[in-house]
Image: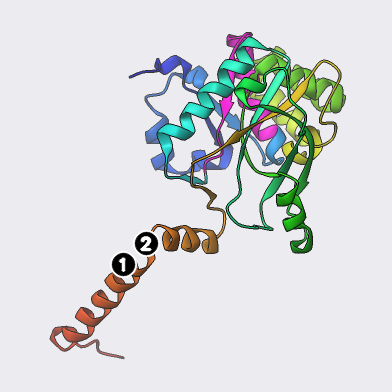
């Protein structure tokens, strides 16, 4: 195993633990690495809870956040961009580096990042300051965004954990205070009760909209975007996007043919199947 077991954290909702299969899967995990989230309070708490555990154990940690429902063809090339983002975040601790994919069509259901056109001191690495975010724009303005050099926001990002918590502290102090209380309880007997109590009072907070987009250039914290080229990337959060990608790759026709062939075989052998009796 490339990563020691004690450094792999698993986040589960408490209602997942009602399922025997989940209990089986978690049985071999070191106890301190299984993190229970009492309730769904949107994406910010969902990310901050495991990051607080990482921060308590590894205060200088640099992490990459990779959403789980993405489809990427050129995986090795994409991960080279992730590696570059991690190196930038490690070298420049005040930077939060997002990956933005160069669009190949005007997709109104994606979020967009509008980068600064001016050269950044790290221009050889092709990063740019983030000017603003545009979430699911009206179809009438998508082409204008593309003309202005906007990138698809993958929400893949790299940063020092303590930098992100500094951003939270500056942007939503009450959210920071809630997780600071959780931090003090980690590893104690009262941890589970305190996490539940904090979550009961916690408001829902969207990570992208209420943290990243609230103030793109916080004092002492810089949001940068690293343009990703030569990678077929798609957010598979909708059935239509799955079909679009399969069509681009030439797989959709084959799948449709296979489905039609299977249906034909079933019809061919249907008369051999026993008839169902209806009472």
Number of residues whose C-alpha sits closer than 10 Å to that of mark 2, classed few (under 14), some (14–19) or many (20 or more): few
- Please state which of residues 206 and 120 is positioned toward the viewer in this rendering: 120
Dot 1: element: helix
| Residue at screen point 70% across, 41% down | 42
Using a 10 Å C-alpha cutoff, classify the residue at mark 1 as few (fewer than 14 neighbours), some (14 to 19) or many (20 or more). few
- Residue 55 placement (x, y as % from top left): 63, 14
Q: Position of residue 99 (x, y in %)?
A: 61, 34
- As drawn, the label of residue 160 is none
2 and 1 marks in contact (CB < 8 Å): yes
Q: Which residue is mark 2?
A: 250
Apparent side of residue 38 relative to residue 137 in the rendered image (left or right): left
Q: Residue furthest left?
A: 272
Tell me if residue 37 comes above or below residue 186 in the rendering. below
Q: Is residue 60 magenta?
A: yes
Mark identifier at residue 254: 1
Q: How many marks?
A: 2
User: In this view of the protein, can residue 120 be seen by the observer?
Assistant: yes
In front here: 89 or 236? Answer: 89
Quadrant containing the N terminus in the rendered view: top left
> In the image, residue 43 lies at what x, y percent?
68, 39
What residue is shown at x 77% (from left), y 47% (from top)?
134
Question: Does residue 190 appear in this view?
Answer: no
Residue 230 position, x and y percent, is 49, 41
Q: Is residue 176 above or below residue 207?
A: above
Q: Which residues are magenta?
A: 45-68
Report the residue at 73% width, 38% height from top.
208
**Residue 153 among magenta residues:** no
Would you identify the image quadrant in which residue 116 lies? top right
Question: Image quarter for residue 124?
Answer: top right
Q: Where, quadrant-wise, is the C terminus in this rendering? A: bottom left
């Amino acid at each position: 195993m490339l990563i020691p077991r004690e450094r792999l954290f698993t986040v589960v909702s408490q209602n997942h633990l009602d399922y025997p299969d989940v209990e089986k899967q978690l049985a071999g995990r070191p106890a301190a690495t299984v993190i229970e989230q009492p309730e769904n309070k949107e994406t910010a708490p969902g990310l901050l809870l495991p990051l607080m555990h990482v921060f308590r154990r590894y205060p200088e940690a640099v992490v990459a956040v990779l959403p789980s429902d993405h489809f990427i063809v050129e995986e090795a090339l994409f991960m080279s961009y992730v590696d570059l983002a991690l190196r930038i975040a490690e070298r420049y601790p005040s930077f939060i580096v997002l990956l933005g994919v160069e669009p190949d069509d005007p997709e109104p259901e994606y979020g967009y990042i509008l980068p600064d056109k001016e050269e950044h001191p790290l221009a050889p690495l092709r990063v740019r300051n983030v000017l603003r975010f545009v979430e699911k724009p009206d179809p009438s303005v998508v082409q204008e965004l593309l003309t202005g050099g906007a990138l698809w926001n993958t929400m893949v990002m790299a940063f020092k954990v303590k930098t992100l918590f500094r951003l939270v502290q500056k942007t939503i102090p009450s959210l920071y205070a809630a997780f600071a209380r959780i931090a003090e309880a980690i590893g104690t007997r009262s941890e589970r009760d305190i996490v539940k109590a904090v979550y009961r009072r916690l408001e829902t907070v969207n990570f992208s909209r209420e943290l990243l987009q609230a103030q793109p250039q916080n004092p002492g914290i810089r949001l940068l975007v690293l343009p990703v080229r030569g990678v077929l990337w798609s957010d598979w959060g909708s059935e239509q996007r799955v079909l679009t990608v399969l069509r681009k790759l030439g797989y959709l026709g084959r799948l449709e043919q296979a489905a039609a062939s299977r249906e034909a075989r079933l019809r061919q052998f249907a008369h051999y199947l026993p008839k169902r009796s209806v009472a």
